[in-house]
Image: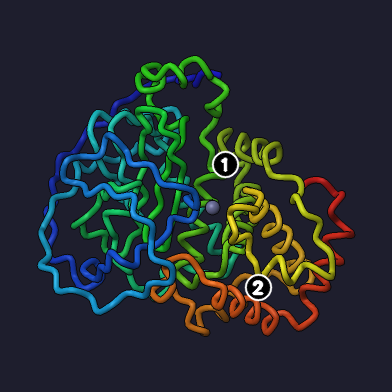
């Protein structure tokens, strides 16, 4: 399905090359040995061939649970922003980029790669999503968190487009274009969001890649704000704490669904996102979940990728969130994630893969928060609802 473009307005680049001051302590605390794992990239990380010469591409696997050591002293290098542009706010206007540029919002920076096609209401909609997300969860993006340091080897598959920029504590959201159909997928951590979305590729880019051009089904006929909300949820929760794969992915799906549902009235893109979401969410996990095995599954957290069924963590996690909401009330996520945070499971301390010990500790915190019988009760809930179909 081809994107219908009613009007194309190439917005004027206001070439305010704002040079920045000192990076400050936040951006200088980098320990490459303890690189954070982008939430969506549990499989091998491809190296982009279009990374600029200045980027340090790396496929190194993060050292499990490697804690940051003392931050090295880094002399900040002032760096100019990419050209700053603004959007019209109108859905039918489009920003077509032929070079990297950035858009500053109240609480984020959109960094847009060359070859993108951004609708005029995109930044406004990101703001709406962030606002609704905070209302839904009772969490805030402005929580006191520490930038663990953006590292070249982990940001956008080896390319760090914002190294040295001063984002003033605003969340960098990078909109990238996959020029060679490498298969990059969106990812997010406490520090950033990277979005690869086919519908944000320009027509020229789309038509220049045969596997895109000849497979129109790969692209939505709407901007998929569900994906945006899912990734933003990762940034929101990870600013508080790490909480294991099942709940990380589960709550991202759960919160994104709630948020997008509540914004369906905003535009046809949100409407399309709701419809698409209903059609594509996973329906069941591979192994049955019972009162007897629910705790073991949670403690294992689908961490053994050789046997884990990819996608189960999303489905099961979303089901756990529904169960917790029904049983304990809407504050369940805030309660649990603050308990994890209070127990020291901060992003700063645990920015690699979680070891068995940590996963067991998180399961213990889960029981302390919701009661010793929480897993048994979830197993019963699962059995009672597993045939409902849509989660
Ligand atoms: Zn995710």
Q: Nearer the viewer, residue 99 or 44?
A: 44
Say few, some or many: other residues with alpha carbon within 10 Å of mark 1 (under 14 / 14 to 19 / 20 or more): few
Q: Position of residue 52 (x, y in %)?
A: 20, 39
Quadrant of residue 368 within the rendered picture: bottom right
Q: Residues within 10 Å of mark 2 (few under 14, many from 20)?
A: some
Q: In x, y percent, where is residue 96?
A: 32, 28
Marks 1 and 2, how far apart at CA:
26 Å
SS type, badge 1? loop
Q: In the rendered view of the protein, which quadrant contains the N terminus?
A: top right
Question: Looking at the image, which residue is at 64% across and 36% down?
Answer: 276
Name which of mark 1 and mark 2 comes first in the sequence.
Answer: 1
- The answer to whether residue 25 is left or right of residue 144 is left
- The image position of residue 320, as x and y in percent, is 72, 63
Residue hosting label 2: 331
Residue 125 sits above or below residue 117 on the image? below
Q: Residue 119 vs residue 292: left or right?
A: left
Q: For the point 10% across and 58% down, which residue is it?
A: 78
Residue 107 visible in the displayed image: no
Q: Which of the pair 311/176 is nearer the observer?
A: 311
Residue placed furthest toward the front: 306
User: Is ligand 1 less than 8 Å from the beta carbon at label 1?
Assistant: no
Residue 157, image x, y percentages:
35, 46
Image mark for residue 215: none
The foreground one among 177 and 331 is 177
Q: Which residue is mark 1?
A: 266
Is any atom of residue 237 visible in this view?
Answer: yes
User: Please, what secondary structure does the residue beneath circle 2 have?
Assistant: loop
The residue shown at (51%, 84%) is 342
């Amino acid at each position: 399905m081809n994107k219908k473009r009613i009007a194309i307005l190439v917005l004027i680049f206001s070439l305010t090359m704002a040079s920045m001051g000192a990076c400050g302590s936040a951006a200088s605390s980098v320990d490459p040995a303890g690189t954070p794992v982008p939430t969506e990239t549990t499989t091998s990380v491809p190296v982009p061939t279009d990374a600029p010469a200045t980027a340090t591409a790396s496929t190194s696997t993060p050292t499990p649970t490697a804690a940051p050591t003392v931050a090295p002293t880094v002399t900040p290098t002032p760096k100019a922003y990419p050209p700053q542009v603004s959007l019209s706010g109108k859905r039918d206007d489009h920003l077509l980029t032929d070079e990297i540029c950035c858009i500053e919002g109240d609480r984020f920076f959109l960094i847009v790669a060359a070859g993108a096609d951004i609708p005029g209401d995109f930044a406004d909609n990101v703001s709406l999503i962030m606002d609704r997300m905070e209302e839904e969860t009772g969490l805030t993006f402005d929580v006191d968190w520490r930038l663990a340091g953006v590292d070249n080897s982990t940001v956008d598959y080896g390319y760090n487009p914002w190294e040295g920029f001063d984002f003033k504590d605003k969340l960098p959201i990078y909109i990238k274009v996959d020029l060679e159909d490498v298969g990059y997928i969106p990812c997010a951590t406490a520090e950033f969001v990277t979005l690869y979305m086919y519908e944000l590729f320009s027509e020229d880019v789309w038509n220049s890649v045969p596997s895109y051009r000849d497979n129109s089904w790969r692209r939505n006929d709407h901007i998929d704000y569900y994906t945006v909300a899912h990734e933003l949820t990762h940034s929101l929760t990870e600013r508080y704490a790490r909480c294991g794969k099942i709940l990380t992915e589960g709550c991202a799906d759960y919160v994104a669904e709630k948020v997008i549902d509540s914004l369906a009235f905003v535009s046809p893109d949100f409407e399309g996102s709701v419809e698409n979401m209903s059609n594509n969410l996973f329906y069941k996990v591979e192994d049955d979940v019972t009162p007897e095995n629910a705790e073991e599954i949670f403690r294992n957290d689908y961490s053994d990728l050789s046997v884990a069924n990819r996608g189960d963590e999303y489905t099961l996690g979303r089901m756990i969130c529904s169960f917790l909401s029904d049983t304990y009330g809407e504050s369940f996520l805030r309660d649990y994630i603050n308990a994890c945070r209070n127990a020291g499971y901060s992003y700063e301390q645990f920015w690699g893969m979680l070891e068995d010990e940590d996963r067991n500790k998180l399961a213990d915190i889960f029981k302390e928060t919701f009661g010793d019988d929480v897993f048994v009760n979830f197993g019963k809930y699962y059995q009672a609802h597993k045939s409902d179909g849509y989660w």
